[in-house]
Image: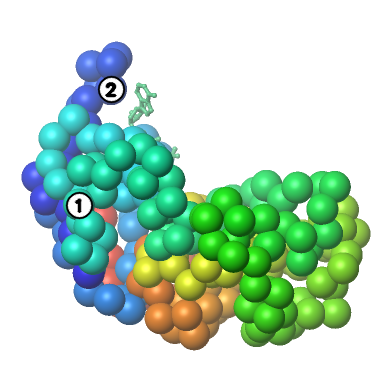
Amino acid sequence: MISIQSVSHQYTSGHQLQFADWQVNNGEQWLLLGQSGSGKTTLLHILTGLLTPTHGKVKIGDTDLYSLSSKKLDAFRGQQIGIVFQKPHLIKSLNITENLLLAQSFAGLPNNKKRVEEVLDSLNMLPKKNAYPQELSQGQLQRVTIARAVINKPTLLIADEPTSSLDDKNAEAVLALLKEQSTLNQATLVVATHDKRVKDAFTLTYTLS
Ligand SMILES: Nc1ncnc2c1ncn2[C@@H]1O[C@H](COP(=O)(O)OP(=O)(O)OP(=O)(O)O)[C@@H](O)[C@H]1O
């Protein structure tokens, strides 16, 4: 379970954001909706341990995120939280398998090639396991980004505006993949977006105003 309780954040500029309490049960799939500037990125950063809120509690499972030391928080993030960014951010000099092995090492986990192949296979990317990022299409790169996010079997899978730069067909395909992968890996899914096309794909919605 993931919960935020009485969370608010004040930037040094004085800008203050307040977030309604939110409880997410294991395996649920949520949409985080809000206009530009409403605080989606701020909340995602708070949920992923990247930004300590000025007030409030963030719990992932039994762990109170901000009671961890920064070293423990880094390891926790690597093992428990998978993040799909808008852009792939892969390392160009490493092939796809090596990029995924690196994500295991960063999380302090032993390298597990079998897991890499299993995840690539589930995303129909196994034939590209030895390819370099620049040899892949945009759609294939996005699949690798999703593979990297789920490689360590995270409790929480987060996607930040995964569809905003895509046409309708590709947006639908990426959403279907995220939902499929969260189910397959038993991860809770949170997709943040201001893309109205995504709305109908989810029944659970947390809206920022
Ligand atoms: N580092 C910062 N310092 C000061 N104010 C900030 C900072 N980051 C964000 N803000 C402010 O906090 C508010 C929320 O920003 P945030 O990036 O979380 O919104 P968002 O919903 O993700 O927007 P978008 O959809 O445009 O990315 C905005 O008014 C923004 O100007």
In the image, 87 versus 114, the foreground residue is 114
Q: Nearer the viewer, residue 28 or 207?
A: 28
- Nearer the observer, 119 or 112: 112
| Image x and y of residue 172, in percent | 58, 74
Residue 17, horizontal then vertical, whole percent: 21, 34
Q: Circle 1 is placed at which residue position? A: 64
Residue drawn at (65%, 73%) of the image: 112
Question: Residue at coordinates 67% horizontally, 56% vertically from top-left?
Answer: 102
Q: Secondary structure at mark 2?
A: loop
Say if disc 2 is inside 8 Å of ligand 1: yes
Q: What sort of colour scheme is used for the picture? A: rainbow
Q: Amino acid at mark 1?
A: Asp
Quarter placement of the N terminus: bottom left
Residue type marked 2: Tyr
The residue positioned 27% from the left and 72% from the top of the image is 204
Q: Where residue 11 is drawn, which disc sits there? A: 2
* Front one among 69 and 18: 69
Identify the residue at horizontal 85%, vertical 79% (top origin): 127
Quadrant where the image shows the C terminus: top left
Residue 56: in sight, yes or no?
A: yes
Count of numbered labels shown in the rendering: 2
First reached walking from the N terminus: tag 1 or tag 2: 2
Q: Nearer the viewer, mark 1 or mark 2?
A: 1
